[in-house]
Image: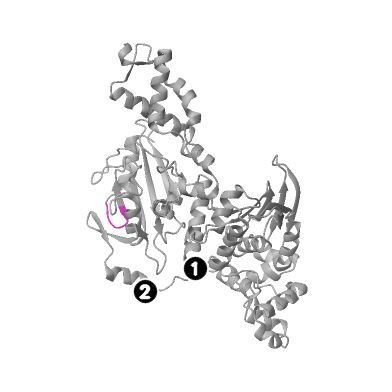
Amino acid sequence: MLEADLLKYLKEHYPKENEKCEWKAFSNLTHNVSGQKGEDVISYVSAIANASGGVLIMGVEDATLKILGIKNFHDYTSENLPARLMGNCTNLSSEGLFVEDFTTSDTHLTIWILHIPKHNARKPIFAHKKAWQRKGDTLIEMVNDREQTILNEPLRQNDDWSAVICNDATIDDLEPKAIDKARANYKNKFPELASEVDSWDDATFLNKAKVTIKGKITRAAIILLGKTEAEHFINPAEAKIRWILKDNNNVERDYLIRSCPLLLEVVGVFQKFRNLKYRYLKSGTIFPDEVEQYEPFIIREALNNCIAHQDYSNGGGRINLVEQNDELIFTNIGTFIPGSIENVIRNNAPEELYRNPFLVTAMYNLQMVDTIGSGIRRMFNFQRVRFFPMPEYDFSNGKVKVTITGKVLDMEYARALAQNPQLTLDEIILLDNVQKKKSITDSGIKHLRDKKLIEGKKGAIHISADLAASTGQTVEYMKTKGVDDAFIKKTITDYLIKFGSAKRQVFEQIIANKLSDSLTDAQKKIKIKHALQALRKNGTIIQNNERKWILKQNS
């Protein structure tokens, strides 16, 4: 697209700024995504979401819409920006949050159009721990009246796919063994009703358990209790689970596909997991401790969550479970309704909105799932007490992907974190991400710094000296911390004293492996480049006619 065509497109679709549309240059994203309160990207996301949703156009001149382009993207991409925003904007939903990426073919200027969804009912969007709103051309902290209006909104009732009646289906299309299992589970869930349940006929029980509606067969009933041949009632949706075992070379070694009634079939799928024994030495003893690689609750919870939150309205699509390399990977179609896993862990409370509320209620009554807050939090805690890495969630490509690791990555580090009573689960999750070299929010970084748990600049964070000492990781700490700028400059000047001249690539070969392990190869090259520039500016080195660095005193 030519620049003139892109400008025409913008003027046609986003002709003026208002509560639904904002134009901003934001040519350098380094400090503009999460930076100055009331002026950065996350503040505008909060303000637009707290109105009725809209767009933030980045890379254009404010007031004129002239295309300037984003010059410095830092480590942001159009793919990772939504997830980074959700980490910095409390209550921000992933539904409808995405970036359109445009680059002009003639002038090579890039702009982003960030699409921002409206806040969910009763959930204002916060950035920098404040809810924002637009006032003229500026942002202000949300006034109390407007915040109260949001907090008192009626909860939106979305169409519930799982509650739809299958008109031609009857109770004869349900599997009797599944109904018997449902009765047993219901009595375990509600023991005070056990004797009463025995007096109910099947139709009454299914109504009471909220699997059917006034004796009519719902889609939820087919998924959980339907005979295998009854799956056609929910076409084009599928009620299928596929388990795959892969070897270290990613070659499929075994597989299993199961359909409804999923209340029964999840047992067969669960039994396919190998769940080998894992042995390690506990602190203070020479005797090994032996546990299963995966806590059975975690497998059941992750599997049943896939069933409960699958987006069946998308038509075809199976729930997939992959077992490979000491990892279990669960995927289901659909976005993650709570927005971020941090929100679930931090709030530790059931969500008010679900994709399939009727199905979730039925599964809860039949003892298949906990409420979303407590079940997921328990998964994290089970990994914590085993010293295993925290579960990893990926919400890209319209799917929810959960990865469970069945081994200790660093025994001394993990044990010290898990047994430290001063550390909260939130802090362990943040440190888990630091160890895995994953990004964390600015607020998370500040919290860990305040607790003296991490050091280093953003993008090159590592555990602190205090934490390294307490976990026996002093060697790893020094490797991660790397050498300082003074060492880099001295190495450069020492080389030039001995050998006279060199190009930058030579210094990269000499110094790169001594830099912090937390830096990428690109970041290491930039750090060496900055050291060379600093030595040039202070008059220590210059470049000769061959574009090689030499000491100025030798020129």
What colour scheme governs how the chains and residues are painted in the rendered image of this protein?
one colour
Label 1 crowding class (10 Å Cα cut-off): few <14, some 14-19, many 20+?
A: some
Nearest the eye: 132 or 525: 525
Task: Name the residue tied to disc 1.
Answer: 353
Image position, residue 3 (x, y; %): 33, 35
Task: Name the residue tied to disc 2.
Answer: 152
Image quadrant in which you'd find residue 505: top left
Amino acid type indicated by mark 2: Asn
At a point 56% along the width and 49% down the height, the residue shown is: 413
Residue 311 visible from this viewpoint: no
Disc with the residue nearer the chain's start (2 vs 1): 2
Nearest the eye: 505 or 266: 505
At a point 66% along the width and 85% down the height, the residue shown is: 193
The secondary structure that dominates the magenta segment is loop
> Looking at the picture, does residue 523 appear above or below residue 462?
above
Image quadrant in which you'd find residue 204: bottom right
Residue range highlighted in magenta:
17-21
Helix, strand or loop under label 2: loop
At a point 75% along the width and 60% down the height, the residue shown is: 271
Image quadrant in which you'd find residue 297: bottom right
Q: Which mark is residue 172?
A: none
> Looking at the picture, does residue 2 appear above or below residue 278?
above
Amino acid type indicated by mark 1: Leu
Image position, residue 206 (x, y; %): 67, 79
Residue 279 visible from this viewpoint: yes
Helix, strand or loop under label 1: loop
> Looking at the picture, does residue 198 appear above or below residue 40?
below
